[in-house]
Image (cartoon, rainbow, N blue to C red):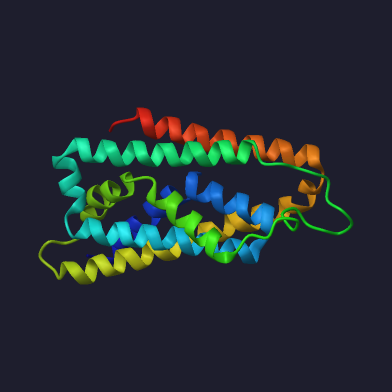
Amino acid sequence: MSLHTWWLFVLMTFVVSATPGPNMLLVLSMSARHGLRPALATMLGCMTSLLAMMSISAAGLGALLQMFPAVFDALRLAGAAYLAYLGVKCWRAPVQDAVGDAAPGDEVAVSAGALYRQGMLVAASNPKAILFAVAFFPQFINPEAAQAVQFGILLLTFSVIEVGWYFVYALSGSRLASYLQRASVLKAFNRLTGGAFIGFAAMMATVRE
């Protein structure tokens, strides 16, 4: 893999990672509700699933899913169902005006473990991440050189860029926290994020390619 090829991968990954999706929306939402530090657990959960799925794709599972569309469809629909559940949960979340200097989400203690698991589930809910790795990563790997080393470099590069965008979304979410102390604003935010998750679920359930 040449330096030119690596820079092309960096550019394309930067654009792909910046595009709003379920992972980025979840990070933004958790940061707005609970603060930047708790959102770190959500980021870690998302990255755990993504790295696992990328590594599994290198072992050939992505090609296997392409050979057996029924298995992929089952995973896709299960992921869509989870995103829809998360959307309904956000939509129906109870709201109230914050008291004093309390920040949104302080009234409900959420453990780092719960945020980590939610991040893992949201990232893992889209099996297309595996197919993305199967179709995207090989374009930048030189078959005449050590493929494991090249895959490791691409995976590390992807991780750095993805985490960087997580922090961009998390910081944006933390800036929203002060506005969410009003019940009316928080309710609108819940409806917006819930509707977005439901929209992602609908897209995943209907798009087959």
Q: Residue furthest right?
A: 100
Q: Residue furthest left?
A: 144
Q: Position of residue 89 (x, y in %)?
A: 58, 40
> Would residue 13 be seen by someone viewing this image from the given angle?
yes
Point out the image quarter for the C terminus.
top left
Point out the image quarter for the N terminus.
bottom left
From this view, report whether residue 160 is shown above or below residue 200: below
> From the viewer's perspective, is 96 left or right of 87?
right
Question: Residue at 41% across / 31% down in the picture?
Answer: 203
> Would residue 19 be seen by someone viewing this image from the given angle?
no
Question: Residue at 87% across / 53% down in the picture?
Answer: 99
Give 30 or 19, whichever is nearer the viewer. 30
Quadrant of the rendered image containing residue 52: bottom left
> From the viewer's perspective, is 102 left or right of 123?
right
Quadrant of the rendered image containing residue 182: top right
Q: Position of residue 60 (x, y in %)?
A: 16, 55
Q: Position of residue 32 (x, y in %)?
A: 68, 53
Q: Position of residue 109 (x, y in %)?
A: 68, 60
Question: Residue at 55% across / 59% down in the picture?
Answer: 115
Question: Residue at 34% across / 30% down in the picture?
Answer: 207
Give 24 or 46, whichever is nearer the viewer. 46
Disc tally is 0
> From the viewer's perspective, is 34 left or right of 146?
right
